[in-house]
Image (spheres, rainbow, N blue to C red):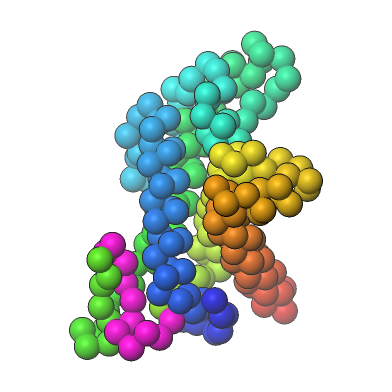
């Protein structure tokens, strides 16, 4: 993964395997959120964020519970707030994830230069990195989506405290997930750096 100037933003050069893994993870995040959604996603981001119809209780799935936490300690207050805000939060997270998927979808300019692997993910035919352009407008969606992925992964494997890390990285069953979690941290750092760079340009 490498950053370089892009078309109106910053271009991240992903290895083809990295682009494929990230796209798969974001698709899984979308499926997770849709499994808890009670309405169809409105194509207009403004109306999507205003949707109501959330549930009354914290999701049983630990990943969803981390992504859609209670806003209040009091159960009754938390349930009332969740009823009117949960669906909008789900929809905003879905809009962010769909933006990342759109940015990850490479449109081949030359059929000889690009190919599609068995999983339907784009890759350069000569093994070169896959370029993904992130603009100042899309970087918040990237930052929020990568953060959501890390929160969901941590919840699934029980990574809550610093001391959990050493135990999970040493276990065969969770080592791979922890390594992806760390890679997402590096990606998030790159995306946040893009956001700071954009703010500096705007202020100049």
Residue at 55% across, 18% down: 57
Work out whether 179 lies above or below 89.
below
Q: Nearer the viewer, residue 13 or 17?
A: 17
Which residue is at the far left?
Answer: 111
Task: Name the residue: 56% across, 84% down.
Answer: 4
Q: Within the magenta stretch, is there residue 101?
A: no
Residue 173 in sight in this render: yes
| Stretch in magenta | 119-129
Q: Which quadrant would residue 105 be assigned to in this image?
A: bottom left
Image coordinates for residue 63, horizontal then vertical, percent: 54, 36
Image check: 101 left or right of 162?
Answer: left
Q: Residue at x 60, y 21 (%)?
A: 81
Q: Residue 108 vs residue 88: left or right?
A: left
Picture quarter with the N terminus:
bottom right
Looking at the figure, which quarter contains the C terminus? bottom right
Q: Is residue 87 left or right of residue 180?
A: left
* Magenta stretch, main secondary structure class: loop
Q: Is residue 117 above or below residue 124?
A: above
Direction from residue 56 to residue 30 in the image, left or right: left
Residue most toward the right? 163
Can you see residue 144?
A: no
């Amino acid at each position: 993964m490498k950053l370089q100037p892009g078309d109106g933003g910053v271009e991240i050069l992903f290895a083809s395997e990295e682009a494929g893994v990230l796209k798969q993870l974001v698709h899984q995040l979308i499926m997770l959120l849709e499994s808890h959604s009670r309405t169809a996603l409105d194509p207009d981001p403004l109306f999507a964020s205003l949707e109501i119809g959330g549930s009354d209780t914290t999701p049983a799935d630990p990943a969803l519970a981390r992504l859609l936490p209670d806003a209040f300690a009091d159960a009754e207050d938390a349930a009332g707030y969740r009823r009117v805000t949960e669906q909008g939060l789900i929809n905003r997270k879905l809009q962010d994830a769909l933006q990342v998927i759109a940015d990850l979808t490479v449109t081949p300019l030359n059929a000889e230069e690009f190919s599609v692997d068995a999983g339907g993910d784009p890759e350069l035919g000569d093994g070169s990195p896959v370029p993904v352009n992130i603009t100042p407008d899309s970087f918040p969606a990237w930052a929020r989506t990568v953060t959501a992925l890390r929160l969901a992964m941590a919840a699934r494997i029980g990574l809550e405290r610093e001391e959990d890390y050493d135990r999970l990285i040493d276990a065969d069953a969770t080592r791979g997930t922890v390594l992806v979690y760390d890679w997402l941290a590096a990606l998030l750092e790159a995306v946040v750096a893009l956001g700071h760079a954009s703010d500096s340009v705007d202020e100049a």
